[in-house]
Image (cartoon, rainbow, N blue to C red):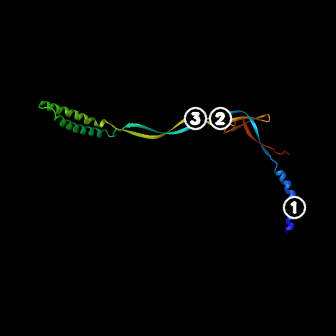
Amino acid sequence: MNKFFLTAVLVSLPLLASASRYNNINHSSVNYGRVIAAEPIYQNITVPEERQVCDRRRNYSDNHNRRNNQNTGKAILGGIIGGAIGNRFGKGRGRDASTALGVLIGAGIGANSNNRHHPTQNCYVETFYHNEERFMGYDVTYEFQGDLYQTQMQQHPGDRVRLRVNVDVID
């Protein structure tokens, strides 16, 4: 059996050598082309941008009658407090005048206390759009063996471009 195996190997060696000779031929090689021009490519695009927008609004009560009732009650309470404070000042008719003045000032402050509306903030997200110029790559013109070629590249090629040149048999 060993003789048979050895004979088969010896017979097939010339065939393998012949096949490998054709398989080892380099069908492509690396060459270089001279860069003539490399122009940057820019593209205008629309870019969405989300922003939070807030506006401030006065907080008004929906019920007008309820506001009037609140103002009346606050005016009465303000008048009582103002009268009590005004009564502490002066003597005789001066005390009466300071009490009356305290009632008027307190009632005015109480009646207007509801007019101090506190602003509320209403926030929401709004999408704004702006145009932007984006770099896309380079239009490259290069020369190889006397002919001009063009391609697009992501990186600037420098003075030369690497080229893979394929050789194919034409029947």
- Up the image or down, 11 lies above or below 102; here it is below
Q: Give whichever of discs 2 and 3 has the lower sequence position.
A: 2
Q: Give whichever of discs 1 and 3 has the lower sequence position.
A: 1
Which image quadrant for residue 94? top left
Residue that extends furthest to the left in the rendered view of this protein: 92
Mark 2 vs mark 3, CA separation in Å:
14 Å
Residue flagged by tag 2: what amino acid is it?
A: Ile
Q: Position of residue 91 (x, y in %)?
A: 12, 32
Residue drawn at (86%, 58%) of the image? 13
Q: Which residue does the numbered mark 3 point to in the structure image? A: 132
| SS for callout 1 | helix
Q: Which residue does the numbered mark 1 point to in the structure image? A: 10
Residue flagged by tag 1: what amino acid is it?
A: Leu
Residue flagged by tag 3: what amino acid is it?
A: Glu
Q: Which residue does the numbered mark 2 point to in the structure image? A: 41
Callout 3: 10 Å neighbours few (<14), some, many (20+)? few
Give whichever of 122, 40 is nearer the camera: 40
Residue drawn at (74%, 40%) of the image? 162
Mark 2 against mark 1, which lies toward the viewer?
1
